[in-house]
Image: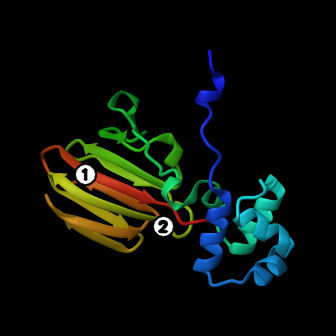
Amino acid sequence: MNRKSKIPDLPAVGANVHRERRRQQLSLDALAAASGVSKAMLSQIESGKVNPTVATMWKIAHALGVDFELLLKGEGGKIKRFEVNRADAVTSFTTDQTGTVFKVLSPISMAEELEFYLVTLEPGSVHRSQPHTEGTEEFITVLSGDVRVTAGKNSADLHKGDFIRFQSDVEHTLENHSEEKAEVYMIVRFAAV
């Protein structure tokens, strides 16, 4: 078995450093001063004559103000996030208040960052929520039925197709005040910490 054939070629680190340095219109002298890596070493790295250590690449990346990964993989090779949350991973829960069911559509990795829910409210049910962290917002689109959203001193009656955005860092409620089941799509965006 030839294990060597499975190892990919080394990344074009030198070409990536050269491209990023030129894009930022920096001279070798300027990058050397900013990174603490000698001009001669930078020149050898860019020409592909040497393979730099991780520590050297770390200094260069920080001096250029770019992700370390960009210098290793280049712009075309940067890994893009692609995460699927399968239907069988979607969890549902009911609250202490009867008649409200939340389906958590977003993966757990997004918790307390950006959360997506499908919320079903039985007729007359009310979901009361304590304030979230300061700066948190909620976005609701009514898919069916009629609901009332109250956040602090503000209140609005919403019908199918209506959308609302509100600060949810105050006490807030979601109420189905109709005689039929209501369903809403909810997004909670937490403030950046």
At x 35%, y 39%, the residue is: 103
Residue type, mark 1 in image: Val
Label annotation for residue 44:
none
Mark in front: 2 vs 1: 1
Q: CA distance from mark 2 to mark 1?
A: 20 Å
Identify which residue is drawn at 82% across, 53% down: 53
Other residues around mark 2 within 10 Å, as few (<14) / some (14–19) / many (≥20):
some
Who is closer to the viewer here, 139 or 73? 73
| Between 112 and 132, the one nearer to me in the picture | 112
Kind of residue at badge 2: Val
Residue 25 figure quarter: bottom right
At horizontal 34% and vertical 65% (from top left) the residue drawn is: 150
Q: CB of mark 2 within 8 Å of CB of mark 1? A: no
Does 98 appear above or below 166?
Answer: above
Quadrant in which the N terminus appears: top right
> Where does residue 68 sit, x and y in percent of width and height?
68, 59
In the rendered image, which residue does mark 2 sit on? 170
